[in-house]
Image: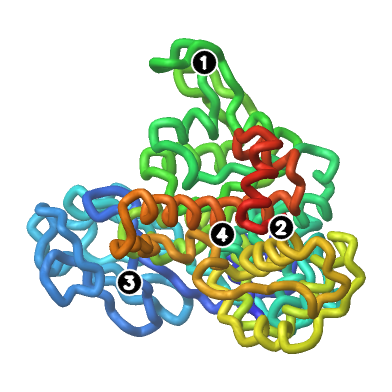
Amino acid sequence: MHVVAITAQTQILSEGVLGPVARTPRLELVVVEGPDMGRACGLERGRAVVVGSEAGAELLLTDERVSRKHVSLRLRDDGAVEVEDLGSRNGTLLEGARVQRAEARAGATLKIGKTFLRLLETPERVAVPPSQSRRFGELVAESLAMREVFAVLERVAESDVTVLLEGETGVGKELAARALHAASARSKGPFVAIDASALPEALVESELFGHVKGAFTGATDARKGAFLHAHGGTLFLDELATVPPSVQVRLLRVLEERKVRAVGADVEKRVDVRVIAASREPLAHRVAEGTFRADLLYRLGVVTVAIPPLRARREDLVPMLSAMLAARGKDWPPRGPALARLLAHDWPGNARELRNVLDRALALAPHAKSFEELPLALGASTAWPQARAGREEPLAVRSDLPFSEAKQAVIDAFERAYLTDVLARTHGNLSEAARQTGLDRKHLRELCQKHGLR
């Protein structure tokens, strides 16, 4: 059964949205400030955890003012934590007071050396029965795994809780976010999507929070940020793992106080926004690496939903194809050898790759009368570009030909591949393809005819 992670500090919210939650205390010790910010260590009941700078410590710190074995913490059955200083040089402070032995609870802060540590409750896991619906917004599925995802999304759509969507590129995280917005009380408000990975690091703050005129070089006019644009609606923050640490601090403050200060401004503005975040990899991995703030992860992941990849739910392929074909005006049942090949494919680009394969086939066979007539090409060329990141496709150069002929062969191969993708993306619409490519429509038509694409 699919499970959803809910931060334990939102017990009342959990019980109101997803039913009663088991309250077995589970704690994590997180570095919230210091040279090792973001590192964390789980606490298990009855087992002492040592924090220090010596190899072998359960939470290893590089802070030069931390002793080799500085402090130990042990979680008791009642949820309290026994804190014991292990004879450190600089002592252990609990909520500002120096202690030798003391008792702490979730939310407490310790300081050792230059490092601040906080005890945080780890997410509880809540089992949710699968939805009876086979559709949520534009997401279509038959598999039990996705219907369990639908069940969680259906429930949280009724509230304003912050949701973190995790899953590989192309699984449909933005579609899920849009469906959550459409099913919520905010559906009449704006839906604003920001892809953090597409923004230069220097502009992330401006895009999110806005800026005033003259705030930096090039800021010739004041502009609203994404939070203000999404006021009264939903803000979708995609690829959140790429947000710089300096911006993470500001983002956390906005989420907690619901106030935004534009870059270069002196005053804050209150915002009413529901935030849905997304990441292609579990953000907990980035926390472990020290590149993502643990406290921001806890604030964002009030409800965390993992969307499974397409290869793990192949039974969804037929209903997804049927829905895509219907949206393109084709009432064709997917079947035959072509469908068997699709079912055997690994789909590294997930649903987005499936959509690209179908659109390319429809563009290349505009007069097809059935699904079996579509040229459904599979392989590396159909994969979503990010799935092949870091792998350069080899350039086929014919050194056995004269230079001019070899050069023309490379140009022809480029033109054919480029035009094939453009036609697939524009569903064979030459006017739209001409606008996107910047080519004259007549010249574009001639190129398509040259390569047999029309």
How far apart are the two marked residues, 1 and 2, measured between alpha carbons?
A: 33 Å
Can you see residue 397? yes
- Residue located beneath label 1 in the image: 212
How far apart are the two marked residues, 1 and 4, measured between alpha carbons?
A: 31 Å
Q: Quadrant of the N terminus?
A: bottom right
The residue located at (40%, 57%) in the rendering is 108
How far apart are the two marked residues, 3 and 2, measured between alpha carbons?
A: 46 Å
- Which one is in front, 358 or 235? 358
* 427, above or below 74, in the image: above
Q: Position of residue 134 (x, y in %)?
A: 84, 75
Closest to the camera, between mark 4 and mark 3, is: 4
The residue located at (49%, 28%) in the rendering is 206
**Marks 4,3: beta carbons within 8 A:** no
- Residue located beneath label 3 in the image: 82
Identify which amino acid the numbered label 2 is placed on: Leu
| Residue 301 circle label | 4
How far apart are the two marked residues, 3 and 1, measured between alpha carbons?
A: 49 Å
Drawn side of residue 58 relative to residue 21, left or right: left
Q: Earlier in the sequence, mark 1 or mark 2?
A: 2
Q: Earlier in the sequence, mark 4 or mark 3?
A: 3
- Which one is in front, 17 or 357? 357
Closest to the camera, between mark 1 and mark 2, is: 2
Q: Position of residue 89 (x, y in %)?
A: 7, 57
- Residue located beneath label 2 in the image: 175
Identify which amino acid the numbered label 3 is placed on: Glu
SS for dot 1: loop
Drawn side of residue 248 relative to residue 357, left or right: left
Q: Position of residue 343 (x, y in %)?
A: 67, 85
Identify which amino acid the numbered label 1 is placed on: Val
Answer few, some or many: residues within 10 Å of disc 1's Cα (few below 14, many 20 plus, some between 14 and 19). some
Q: Quadrant of the C terminus?
A: bottom right
The residue located at (84%, 47%) in the rendering is 185
